[in-house]
Image (tube, grey):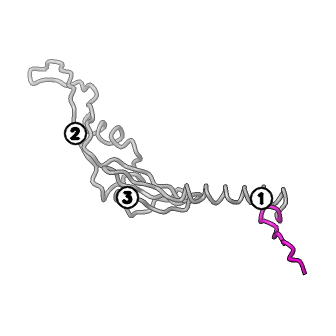
Amino acid sequence: MSARSFKQPSMTMALGPVGRWALAILVLILFLLFYFSGAIVNAGHVGVVTTFGEVDNTVRPPGFYLIFPLAQRINQIDTRVQPHPFKEIDAASQEMQSVILTGMMNYHLEPGRAAFLFQNVGLDFANKVIDPAFND
């Protein structure tokens, strides 16, 4: 008896051309799902997680986090000291002279209050909170 060489069909030969395309699309979808399922919160920031737009009250410190890519998003909020310029404020001196004031204020956000601030005020809180307080 002679030994015949029997060649087993490879995976790509067994799938056919349509199966190869389906496999390539499946691999691409799995890669994209894995790629977008992680989020990084950078140093000097905290992360506020939103799930379908609803704010989660826990604040994430800097680091890597796994998320559900279609449902969750991590919004980074800067907690470092930032300068905020005053807009020109018209005032009167004690002698009733007209004075225009300008200035610069340094501020930072407390990390524990980031979720509350993000939910109730938004990301441009300096313009919404600090400027009106100084104009009064």
| Residue under pointer 2 | 106
Give whichever of 42, 26 is nearer the camera. 26
Give whichever of 102, 110 is nearer the camera. 110
Instruction: Classify the position of the N terminus by image quarter.
Output: bottom right
Where does residue 11 sit, x and y in percent of width and height? Answer: 77, 65
The first of marks 1 and 3 along the sequence is: 1
Circles 1 and 3 in contact, beta carbons < 8 Å: no
Query: Cα distance, mark 1 to mark 2?
Result: 56 Å
Question: Label 1 crowding class (10 Å Cα cut-off): few <14, some 14-19, many 20+?
Answer: few
Q: Secondary structure at mark 2?
A: strand
Circles 2 and 3 in contact, beta carbons < 8 Å: no
Q: Secondary structure at mark 3?
A: strand
Say which mark, if any, is on residue 39. Answer: none
| Residue under pointer 1 | 22
Kind of residue at badge 1: Ala
Q: In the current view of this chain or complex, which residue is farthest to the front?
A: 1
Vertical placement of 36 versus 108: above or below? below
Say which mark, if any, is on residue 63. Answer: 3
The number of discs equals 3
Kind of residue at badge 3: Gly
Where does residue 6 sit, x and y in percent of width and height? Answer: 84, 72
Main secondary-structure element of the magenta-colored stretch = loop
Q: Secondary structure at mark 1?
A: helix
> Which residue: 37% across, 60% down?
60
Where does residue 78 sit, x and y in percent of width and height? Answer: 33, 47
The first of marks 1 and 2 along the sequence is: 1
Report the span colored magenta. 1-14
Kind of residue at badge 2: Asn
> Which residue: 84% across, 71% down?
5
